[in-house]
Structures are given as C-alpha cells and as structure tokens.
Amino acid sequence: MSYDYTSIGFYTFDCLARPVTAIPPGGDTYFVEDFALAVSGAAGAAAVVAAKYGLRVQAVGGVGDDLMGEWVLKRMGDFGIDTGMMQLCRGVSTSSTIVTTRPDGQRPALHKRGATGAFEITEADYDRVLDAKIVHVGGTGLMDRMDGPPSFALMAEAKRRGRITTLDVFAASKKDMASVAGLLPHTDYFIPSIEEARALSGLEAKEDIGRYFNDLGVACTVMTMGADGAYYHHVDGTRFHMPAFEIDVVCTCGCGDAFNAGFATGLINGYDPEETTRLGQASSALNATGLGSQAGVVDLESTLAFLRRTPVKRAA
C-alpha cells in the first residue's frame, strides 16, 4: 500500500493566543505572551503528528480558495504529507478557528466551519483514499456532505478491503448519534473524548459506555479522559484504564487528535493494546506542553523517551 495512514475529515487553520482571560471591552487591546498558527482539526492534527512519527500520511478533506487554505496545504507539505486528495472548495473559506487559550490550558474558541462541510469523496476516489493500512475519519458531525450514508459507505468499503479503521467525532448531544451509528459496525477503534461518548450514549460510567458502543457494532472504544487518562474497552474482553502523565499543561488544543496519531503509530508498529494506548497518551501529553496542535510533539524517538521518563498521575 502507498500509505500507512489516510486521515479524512476536519482540517482547520488555527490562530492561537495565550494567556487569554477575557475579551477586551470596546476597542481596547490586551497583550498576550504567546501566539501561534497551526494545522488542526480531528483529521489535520492527527495527520501532522502521524507524519512526525514517520508514517506515510495522506490528507483527505477540503480547504477554501484563500490564504488560510494555502497555508494549511503548505504546512502539511512541510511534514511530507501527501495533500493530493485535499479538495479546493470554491465559494467557501477554509475552516478556521481563533483559539483563546486560558492560563490552565483550556481553549475556548471561535470557529468558522467552512470547507469541512463542502468536500466530498465519491466511489471514483476509493482506490486512492483507501490505499492505506489505517483509514481514519476525524470530525464526523461537521462534514455536511460526507456525514451519514456517504461516510457509512466509505467505511464499509474500507473494512471490505481489510483496512484498519479508526473514528473520531464532533459530538455535543444524543442527536449526533445519527451520524455515528452507521459507522460503528465498520469501525475497529472508536476514539471519542469521554465528554463526546457521554453525549452520544446518554450514559455516565465508562464501562457502561464501552458496552453500549460494543452493542452497536464497534470492536473497540478508547475514550480519552484528559487529566484522568484513557479507557480501553474491547469486545474481546480486554479492558483497562490508563492514567495520564504528570505534565505542566500549556494548551489542550489537539490533544485528542495527537492521541489518535500516537495510537495509530502503535498499531502500525505492532504494539500490544497497552503499549498502543500508552503511546497515544504520551502523544497527547506532549501536545499539551506547547501552544497549538502538535507544538509539543517532535518525533517518535522523543515521545518514546518522554514515555519512559515521565511519571503518571496517581489514582485519586
């Protein structure tokens, strides 16, 4: 196969500032200490981290005919990502976000949906898009033209061809299950945040949520839980909770997406479930040490060294 990782879906241009504690009143100006630009989104940030880890990566999504789109494509090219399947969506802007990062790392944002809702994958694209060991869909719930039957058909074909499939979502309530349920029978690893998993399932306990998604057809649910670590729940009975690393948080933007890329890298390298989840955790933790998606991630060697030397949080 030509690629290790095809990352499909949500690509954004991010502009970030830190620390932001309030929006200036009127026409006033507040000064910040740090400012950054980043390729982000559930597909974009994962693609960049995977490329930093040495995976052969293909980006599939949409950008607008604007300066933000030009920058996103150039920046991904800097990391060796193949952007040949990134569609130029005329008449819409590149999906873009202003991120106001708080001193504690939380990141309230102002977002314009843009081209994420305008790109489309047809059957004619399948041979190219699915030419990868892992097919990742990131951003279900935001892809207006792809959510629902088009994504269901794409993931079903990925599984028919024997690909490993992973899924991340943008979910805020139970109604978003309409865009997710049809993907789960074709998904090997569903990787939502605990907040998204609770919103979709209407359940609270991670064990109950894992069983709920198993019953809907997914092989394994891996929930990212921020400072509480991650929970792995496989239909084969493999289940464990993994604590988070002890770090000083700068910005949490893109942490779940970095986890996705680390997890995929573990799968590509044949790691066992705990090693794979731990690499996802380390990728997420390092991501949080810099401003903006992937800022704290350098390469796989550095992440493995971080993993070996950094203590984890003790259970409460």
Image: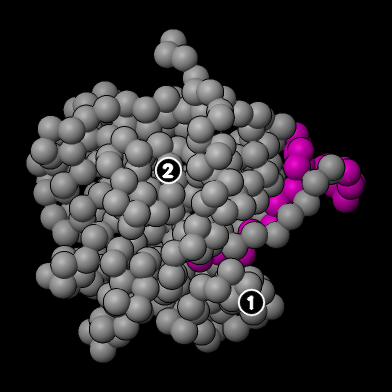
- Whether the magenta-drawn stretch holds residue 192 is answered as no
Residue found at x 16% / y 72%: 161
Looking at the image, which residue sits at the far top? 316
Q: Position of residue 228 (x, y in %)?
A: 44, 25
- Whether the magenta-drawn stretch holds residue 30 is answered as yes
SS at badge 2:
helix
Position of residue 107 in the picture relative to residue 41 (left or right):
right
Identify the amino acid type marked 2: Gly
Q: Position of residue 271 (x, y in %)?
A: 31, 46
Label disc, if present, on residue 29 of the rendered structure: none
Residue found at x 59% / y 76%: 77
Q: Which of the two labelled residues, at mark 2 and mark 1, occupies the earlier sequence position? A: 1
- Above-or-below relation of 85 to 157: below
Residue found at x 13% / y 55%: 185
Position of residue 303 in the picture relative to residue 212 (left or right):
right
Q: Nearer the viewer, residue 283 or 116?
A: 283
Q: Is residue 165 visible?
A: yes
Q: Position of residue 142 (x, y in %)?
A: 40, 61
Q: Which residue is mark 2?
A: 280
The stretch of residues the image draws in magenta is 8-31
Residue found at x 67% / y 44%: 290
Q: Nearer the viewer, residue 216 or 263?
A: 263
Q: Nearer the viewer, residue 12 or 226?
A: 226
Q: Which residue is mark 1?
A: 74
Position of residue 282 in the picture relative to residue 263 (left or right):
right
Identify the amino acid type marked 1: Lys
Position of residue 220 in the picture relative to residue 86 (left or right):
left
The crowd level at tag 1 (other Cα within 10 Å; few <14, some 14-19, many 20+) is: some
